[in-house]
């Protein structure tokens, strides 16, 4: 993998096979999720092995966002989604299972969930639905 820092021997992202990469720039890489939630589900990671979004530099953040745009254009062209969820699980308590920062781009499709309202709020289901009491 070009310019990937090999600081974590067991990290699946630090050891990502080159054929999985769909795009890269100086500080980041874009590839499809190995366990996609939907067609076009992509990940964007920093090349440097770092666990948290809050540990990366401004340059790394900008590089990741640049590739997020590239991944979104590809998803739009290939899958024609009706929307997107964009997210980061930062820390074990937030559900992070791979300790290498990764940004998810999850294309969403009309009808993929009976009621998609609340989106990422469903990480804590009992607090997700704030609208029912108002309807």
Image: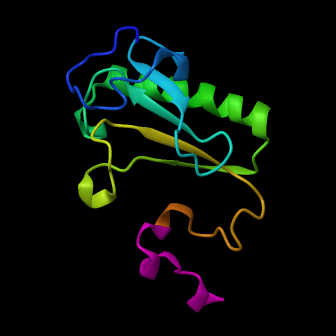
Stretch of the chain drawn in magenta? 122-135
Number of numbered tags placed on the structure image: 0
Please identify the quadrant where the C terminus is shown: bottom right
134 within the magenta span: yes
Q: Quadrant of residue 72?
A: top right
Q: Is residue 76 visible?
A: yes
Locate residue 23, reporting x and y percent.
Answer: 55, 18
Q: In the displayed structure, does residue 2 sit left or right of residue 67?
A: left
Locate residue 116, reporting x and y percent.
Answer: 65, 67
Kindly identify the residue that appears in the image at 48 percent across and 67 percent down.
121
Q: Is residue 22 visible?
A: no
Q: Quadrant of residue 28?
A: top left
Locate residue 64, reporting x and y percent.
Answer: 45, 27
Kindly identify the residue that appears in the image at 53 percent across and 25 percent down.
67
Q: What is the residue that sits farthest to the top in this orientation?
A: 2
Kindly identify the residue that appears in the image at 29 percent across and 32 percent down.
11
Q: In the displayed structure, does residue 115 sit left or right of residue 19?
A: right
Viewer-closest of 117 and 48: 48
19 within the magenta span: no
């Amino acid at each position: 993998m070009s310019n990937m820092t090999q600081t974590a021997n067991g990290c699946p992202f630090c050891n990502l096979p080159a054929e999985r990469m769909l795009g890269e720039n100086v500080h980041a890489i874009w590839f499809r999720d190995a366990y996609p939630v939907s067609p076009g589900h992509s990940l964007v990671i920093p090349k440097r092995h770092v666990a948290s979004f809050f540990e990366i530099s401004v340059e790394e953040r900008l590089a990741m966002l640049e590739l997020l745009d590239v991944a979104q254009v590809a998803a739009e062209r290939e899958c024609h989604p009706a929307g997107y969820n964009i997210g980061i699980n930062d820390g074990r308590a937030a559900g992070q299972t791979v300790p290498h920062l990764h940004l998810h781009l999850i294309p969403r499709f009309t009808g993929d969930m009976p009621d998609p309202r609340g989106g990422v709020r469903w990480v804590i289901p009992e607090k997700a639905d704030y609208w029912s009491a108002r309807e």
